[in-house]
Image: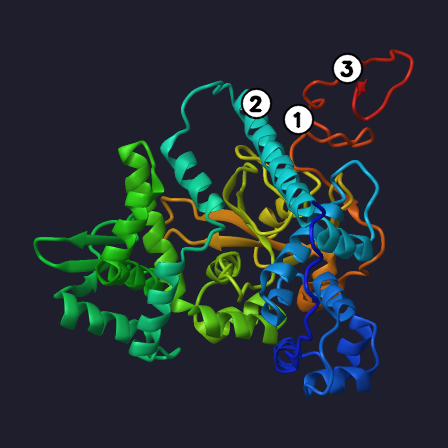
Amino acid sequence: MASQPLPRRRLFEGFRLRDLRRRLNIPQAGMAQRLGISVSYLSQIENNDRPITDGVLLALAREFPVEAAEINGEDGTAALLRAIDAATDSSVPTDRIDEADIRRGIEQQPLLARRMVALHDAYRRSQEQLRVLDDRFDTGSGDAAPLPWEEVRDWFQAEGNYIDAIDRSAELLADALALEDDNIVRAFEDRLRLWHGVRVIGAQGDGSELSRFDEAARTLALNHALPPESRAFLLAHRLVRYEFANEMRVVIERAGLTAPAARELLSVGLANYAAGALLMPYGRFRAAAYELRHDIDRLRQRFAVSFEQACHRLSTLQRPGAQGLPVFFCRVDMAGNITKRHSATRLQFAALGGACPLWIVHEAVAIPDRILVQLAEMPDGTRYVSMAKGLVKPSGSFARPPRRYAVALGCEEAHAADFVYADALRTGGAATPIGASCRICPRLDCDQRAFPPAGSMIEIDPDRRRAVPYGFR
């Protein structure tokens, strides 16, 4: 029997569209232009004088793929958004499908559309598995079981770097404490002392430890050299271990990690997550991020956090129905190792090791306290606006070198209007070609290639000299 078309609905949700436009700080004329309609038509929609048509929904899905779900979160539109993503994925070697054809396909063959989305999801998973196998081959780990830190990293990635129960609890606690810039440290110290019997003292010794908790004495010693934002984070980290102990225990039990060390690492990771969520409550931080166009310096000043903490928090804004800007985030050390990573975009990092040397984050490591920007293009044609900044964390002693690394944050070029760092670039122009890993990068003309991609055939011409001494196919 032929499948029945999806029923047509008259969608009067203009107030949601108006709220979205205002939150993104887009004037009516600008929103109308991006949706391809007149200002008067948009005004009628926002006043609920006219319904939101399929054409407007498609335009919303194209221009604001994350926020479109807020306008209409029902199954039909959710299926449409996922089908559009699958059909327009430039990494799939086939012709793109017109959005109008996608709509007709969902209406006429909904089971076929769901099958297409499922196949696309499987394709993405296979690409991720290829990256993992590539890294294991590169590091010689073979079929060995994942290390504890790998288990935890992969678990956070699978969860979308968002833990709902902990995030919402942190938001409620932040409201209860009435945190403001000038009282955060005092509020945390008072809560620890009055509710949990923990006193905060100055650290003794050579200063090699950032903090030390003495269970018997019920004291938390903090390094005197810590900047205010680090002091606040460590206080929050100790506080959430008491306040959210039950929530974290449930998450750990359900995570299914095999190694005891992995469960201990997850406990620390969840406390880090909760501390960030407490310092930067979800709703207020997400709203501020859009208001400030994801200007990290302004965000860190508003919430009294560090540059890295603000970047990391942006990568966790994945609450269903209220997602933040889809970004990727990573931290790279002086040797090029990626020590933190998460991506809510189509860009996926190699599971182990470093990143493409053409990516600007490597240059940023050597230039501390200066923001570098780059328009980059992956082999699949997807283009990203990225920001990178080198950071130095003083050790507090001449005997120990400071920690040096760079953090990077980026989004797809389609979201450039919401990413202040794109203002320094000519979006739509030439982009730097980058890749995820040399072993899976198919680029033939990269002068920075370290080795040929896995499975390729080496071609050597002794009569031709190039930057890379071989070709491949």
Q: Quadrant of residue 100?
A: bottom right
Residues at circles 3 and 1 in contact by the CB criterion of under 8 Å: no
At x 43%, y 20%, the residue is: 144
> To which residue does mark 3 refer?
457
Give the label on residue 5, or none: none
Which label's residue is closer to the chain start, 2 or 3?
2
Q: Position of residue 73 (x, y in %)?
A: 58, 65
Q: Position of residue 406 (x, y in %)?
A: 55, 50
> To which residue does mark 2 refer?
138
Q: Position of residue 235 (x, y in %)?
A: 28, 63
Q: Quadrant of residue 13?
A: bottom right
At x 67%, y 61%, the residue is: 65
38 shown above or below 312? below
195 shown above or below 256? below
Estimate the spatial distance between the alpha carbons at disc 3 and disc 1, rounded to whole Å.
13 Å
Amino acid identity at mark 1:
Arg
- In the displayed structure image, the side of residue 359 where residue 311 appears, left or right: left
Q: Position of residue 98 (x, y in %)?
A: 83, 53
Amino acid identity at mark 3:
Met
Estimate the spatial distance between the alpha carbons at disc 2 and disc 3, rounded to whole Å.
18 Å
Residue 207 visible somewhere in the drawing: no
At x 81%, y 61%, the residue is: 426
Amino acid identity at mark 2:
Asp
32 shown above or below 88? below
> To which residue does mark 1 refer?
439
Tag in front: 2 or 3: 3
Of all residues, the one furthest to the left in this rendering is 216
Estimate the spatial distance between the alpha carbons at disc 2 and disc 1, rounded to whole Å.
8 Å
Position of the N terminus, as image quadrant, is: top right
- In the displayed structure image, the side of residue 69 where residue 193 appears, left or right: left
